[in-house]
Image: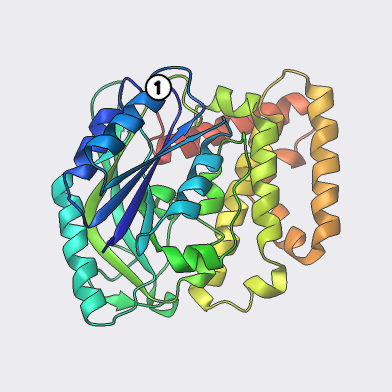
Amino acid sequence: MKYITFTIPCYNSQEYMRHCIDNLVAAGDEVEVIIVNDGSKDDTGKIADEYEKKYPTIVKAIQKENGGHGSGVMAGIRNATGLFFKVVDSDDWVETKDVLDLLMLIKQHEAENANVDLYITNYVYEHAVDNSQYVMHYRKCLPAEKIISWEDMKRVKLETVFLMHSLLYRTEKLRESKMELPNHTFYVDDIYAYQPLPFMKKIFYHDLDLYHYFIGRSDQSINYGTMCKRYEQQMRVFKIMFCAYTYDEIYKQPKFLKKYMVKWLMTICGITIMTIVGTKEDKETRWKVFKEYFEELKGIDRKLYNKIRHRSLAAFAFTLPGYSLKSFASRNVYKIFQKRLKLG
């Protein structure tokens, strides 16, 4: 029986994917490892096929045309046979001993018919520049090692939001959410860590440093300059999140989940604002895009728009006169945000 499906979206990953894959296949036949070659131009596809041939009961290689990270994740969801589903990027990793630890816990819960829908674990920022580590944990906001519901949760601060790296979804519930990640779009992790949450009724926080997230390269998608260049993709992601649930649907959720969803939307709204106006390049076009974009969202759900837009991060920047001041404020707000989350 496959308890966990690990999906590894890969694009030109020949230099580092083996480390990620080796740690997973070492956990044995109770895991499934789906390697998705997303139209790579190097030997990524050959390496994926090599692992499938070597570990036919564990590894499944999927060869597809390039569609971006979200496309790779969706291919994994469609083909997964494991009870639970987790994404591991090809330059990140999990330690085999921690996979075995998690497997033991899941098997225990399944034997007890506990019906856990979501496992939350810690993740570790592995910084490329200075080789330092920073563990993102949830000890101050979640009761550990017990099955809980959203009603049992405490306040979550900005720096301890749930990200893709911390989430292990029950595959059946993930599919029920009907989440669709867009092609050729960065930042789809934000959708992944938002839309499925209302479908997860029983939650278990396992205080385990499971996921190791390699961070700090200058070309990484969370680099501020890179994000500003990809502002249209950030807009696409936030619009999908905004449209996933209406104001009324959000406010029917349990108290903690309702507050969390609103707060996360505010955060992503703020980041979207910062990427639209956070640079002096092509400022007239971006300012026009900004106004038209938020007018469109207002027309979709005015109540949710009013709740999110005027309380989002960096909203204060738009009370300032002039585009240059807005741009300056956005850059500096993101630097604060980046420093708090140790994003490089």
The quadrant holding residue 225 is top right
Q: How many numbered callouts?
A: 1
Kindly give the residue lying farthest to the bottom in the view shown: 113
User: Is residue 22 shown left or right of residue 82?
Assistant: left
Q: Residue at x 56, y 63 (%)?
A: 261
Location of residue 257 with respect to 102 vertically, above or below: below
Residue 89 image offset from top left, x and y in percent: 38, 37
Given residues 330 and 7, the one toward you in this image is 7
Given residues 188 and 174, the one toward you in this image is 174
Residue 311 visible: no
Q: Residue at x 17, y 50 (%)?
A: 28
SS for tag 1? loop
The quadrant holding residue 68 is top right
Q: Residue at x 16, y 58 (%)?
A: 101
What's the amino acid at mark 1? Arg
Residue 215 image offset from top left, x and y in percent: 36, 30
Question: Would you call the spot at circle 1 few (<14 residues within 10 Å), some (14-19), or many (20 or more)?
Answer: some
Q: Which quarter shows the N terminus?
A: bottom left
User: Dot 1 corresponds to which residue?
Assistant: 217
Residue 194 visible: yes
Q: How is the model colour-coded?
A: rainbow
Q: Which quarter shows the C terminus?
A: top left
Q: Residue at x 30, y 25 (%)?
A: 16
Residue 188 image offset from top left, x and y in percent: 56, 44
Location of residue 47 with respect to 72 vertically, above or below: above
